[in-house]
Image: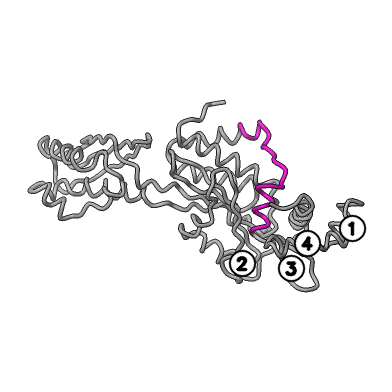
Amino acid sequence: MLTPRQGFVLQAICDLYSETGEPVSSGAIAKLAGDAFSSATIRSEMARLEALGCVKQPHTSAGRIPTAQGYRYYINHLMPRRELPVEKQREIARFLRQGVRDPDILLTRASSLLAYMTNYAVLATSPQLSDLSMEKLEVVALTPQTLALVALTNTGLVLNQVCQLGLPAGERQLEKLSGFCRKNLLHRPLHEVALLRDDFLQRELGGDYLCLAPAVQLICRMCAELCRAKVHLEGQSNLLRYAAPEHGYNAFLELLKETDTLLRAAPKEGGNVAVLLGDDLDQELAGTTLVSTGYLFGDEHTGVLGIIGPRHLDYTRIIPHLAYFTDLLGRILNGTDGDG
């Protein structure tokens, strides 16, 4: 933990850098401090913060700018906590509830709205749901060769697909398909269902393989899709209003589309905020920032919601938005969200 004086200096550097985008000098901090600290004391504390890895000096003649570590400390320990106005919370909730229970639709709507409200780009990942299981599967014949498949997971997530069979199916084939699903698909982790091999299907379905295999293969693909965390990216055009770093934002955005990168950048504890600076990954990405936090689906399935912009983001404005959006996403997905 920093001393109160170090905390004051770090907070001043973060606040002033967010306002101006320029390195912060000891003189600028001295104006904020008034008679509380001398310029020599402030310079000494800036040097200590640099030694601790909280700030850095971009070049010898400049002041200091925050590092990712400094921003994390600022956000989680120093920045004043604010909440969105109640009326704004209600507007957001009304909009997002229209995509209730479908994670992809909900995340697309949330990302678009958050990008619109903050004027930054937004990245979100769906939760990785590989250890979910199917609790129920209904097979409904629409025509002799067309089936509707409706699956219910143990978290209440409903999946719907329409399938074309290889051959027309009668009552016997439909009963065989239902029996196969009860025996081999229900109550198994989705990642196991996704990996069912074709030779296993041939052996289990026997002479009805050509007819019924398309339905089972579609179910396996549905499970595989749920096991894969998807990345949603919205609001890229918002970045045009900010001075671009030397190599632009595109390289940073492309890198963040890689799910592993985004998940590594996510906070490890619920409620905390993670800061990933572009130059933490590559010097060519300097000047870009991802600020992210997690939302919970079930007991342990974490998705990520993050805001992308220039290094000197307006953290005091975006953190309340991130906090409310992630809390609401978790409540909607878990079915604990009221209508108030």
Q: Earlier in the sequence, mark 2 or mark 4?
A: 4
> Mark 1: which secondary structure?
loop
* 74 is within the stretch colored magenta: yes
> Mark 3: which secondary structure?
loop
Q: Residue 46 carries which label?
A: 4
Q: Which residue is drawn at 35% across and 48% down?
A: 130
Image coordinates of residue 148 in percent, x first then y, are: 26, 38
> Mark 4: which secondary structure?
helix
Q: Earlier in the sequence, mark 3 or mark 2?
A: 3
Image coordinates of residue 300 in percent, x first then y, are: 44, 43
* 19 is within the stretch colored magenta: no
Q: Earlier in the sequence, mark 1 or mark 2?
A: 1
* Front disc: 3 or 4: 4
The kind of residue tagged 3 is Gln
Disc 1 from disc 2: Cα separation: 33 Å
Residue at which label 1 appears:
38
Q: What stretch is highlighted in magenta?
A: 69-90
Q: Earlier in the sequence, mark 3 or mark 4?
A: 4
Residue at which label 3 appears:
57
- Secondary structure predominantly adopted by residues drawn in magenta: helix
Task: Specify the quadrant of the image occupied by residue 131.
Answer: top left
Q: Residue at x 62, y 34 (%)?
A: 89
